[in-house]
Amino acid sequence: MSNIHVEARQVVVPGQILATGMDHLPGDNTFRREEEIVAKRLGTVGTDGRVIKVTPLNGPYFPRVGDKIIGKVYDILMSGWRINTGSVYPAMLPVRDASNKFVKSENLRNLLDIGDFCVVKITKVSSQNMVDVGMRDPELHRLEGGRVIKINCNKVPRVIGKMGSMIGLIKKQTNADITVGQNGLVWIRADTPENEYRAENAIKIVNEHAHQSGLTEKVEAYLNGVQ
């Protein structure tokens, strides 16, 4: 029989024993040592069924296939666009993967121009960390208006919340459109600058206090004007 030695969202350190026994499985940033599951990273502990995992408190973003991210165009070639992914690894958006419609090479700037932000999905990461992205799905597109802010990419799951509960709360209370990229970039566009500011501050509260309990109540209190 397994015993879990930590509580949900508890901050743990490398080498700390999280559980003993064989009923649970090691997940992200953990490993098995005989009958013990041990933390690899400084972070908060969580469970997903039988799996015990640790979410790091900090660290850079590493592109993974399937991630939906927000990128910024910094160069245009005949074959497509170079995208800043918010990591040390830039990405290439080939023309063929940018739209379901035919795009002439001389009209690339009409679809995406230098300085534009866009929502893209990582389609390939090579062994040399060459990254390709695509933008053909309806949820992937150029972002217009609003503002883009940066948060800790490791806090993205808390910003989104279970089944989208946290980001849904912020959207509802601020009447804002919000897109959260797995790379830690967040786009916010609301009906007024004041609501954009409130949405930004609410997201920053989650980012700063992600490891604490009672986070939903803290965000609700801020959005309702309770000090």
Image (cartoon, rainbow, N blue to C red):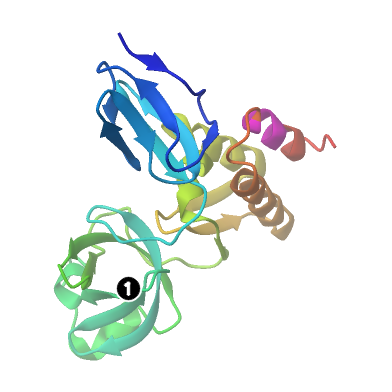
The location of residue 88, given as percent across then percent down, is 37, 73
The location of residue 34, given as percent across then percent down, is 24, 27
What's the magenta region?
Answer: 215-220
The location of residue 182, given as percent across then percent down, is 39, 53
Residue 31 is at least partly visible in this image: yes
Relative vertical location of residue 33 with respect to residue 28 in this rendering, above or below: above
The C terminus is located in which quarter? top right
Of the pair 8 and 216, the residue shown nearer to us: 8
Q: Quadrant of residue 192?
A: bottom right
The N terminus is located in which quarter? top left
Query: What secondary structure prevails in the magenta region?
Result: helix
Of the pair 202 and 178, the residue shown nearer to us: 202
Of the pair 53 and 92, the residue shown nearer to us: 53
Residue under label 1:
89
The residue located at (32%, 73%) in the rendering is 89
Relative vertical location of residue 91 with respect to residue 218 in this rendering, above or below: below
Residue 27 is at least partly visible in this image: no
The residue located at (19%, 88%) in the rendering is 105
Q: What is the crowding at mark 1: few (fewer than 14 residues within 10 Å), some, or many (at least 20)?
A: some
Q: Amino acid at mark 1?
A: Tyr
Q: Residue furthest top?
A: 1
Q: In the picture provided, is 145 more to the left or to the right than 88?
A: right
- The count of marks equals 1
Q: Is residue 210 magenta?
A: no
Q: Quadrant of residue 190?
A: bottom right
Of the pair 75 and 127, the residue shown nearer to us: 127
The location of residue 26, given as percent across then percent down, is 29, 32
The residue located at (83%, 34%) in the rendering is 226
